[in-house]
Amino acid sequence: MVLGFLVAIPVAVFHTWVWGLGIVIGAALAWLNFRWLKQGLDALTVAATSQHGGEKVRVPIVSYFKAAFRYALIALTIYVIFKYLHVPALSMVCGLCALGAATILVSVHSILRSTD
């Protein structure tokens, strides 16, 4: 989220505010996608761990919904924002890439600061 906001500020100032808004929206959607993926994997881990002991555990149906439809919901959100708010779709796609860019940045930082 932070990287998306940091990129959106100069884009809004030097290009257009609508592009900056699109990057912020894309970064927020990427963060939401990551959170839903984490929640789904946590639910899967709990179910797999509980099956080891033989007891039956119920995974909330919301977890399955979030896992199955997270990309569809992001696509629908981007479409609605593009169609009705006239925010460029490419700017939102660039914002969606903020999560990947942040991951690369943290990885490079960890490699350069390695103590081993």
Image (spheres, rainbow, N blue to C red):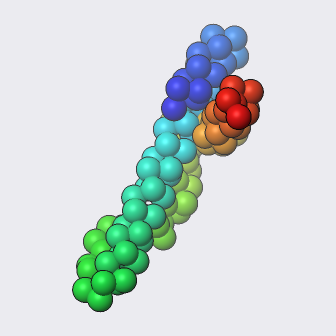
From the top left corner, tell me how far across and down residue 42 is, in percent: 40, 62
114 or 56, which lies in front?
114
Q: Quadrant of residue 66?
A: bottom left
Q: Going 44% across and 50% down the picture, which residue do you hit?
A: 35
Tell me the residue at 25%/86% (across/down).
55
Instruction: Please tell me whether residue 75 is drawn above or below residue 2 in the rendered image.
Output: below
For this orientation, the residue located farthest to the top is 13
Instruction: Name which residue lies at 64% across and 39% down.
Output: 103
Give the camera-side residue of 66 and 13.
66
Q: Position of residue 29 (x, y in %)?
A: 51, 44
Residue 97 in the image: state x and y as whole percent.
66, 41
Left or right of residue 112: residue 45: left
Determine whether 22 is above or below 39 in the image: above
Q: Which quadrant of the structure image shows residue 90?
A: top right
Regarding residue 68, the answer to whether it shows in the image is: yes
Quadrant showing the C terminus: top right
In this view, the residue farthest toward the bottom is: 54
Q: How many marks?
A: 0
User: Residue 71: x, y in percent?
Assistant: 55, 60
**Residue 77 visible in image:** no
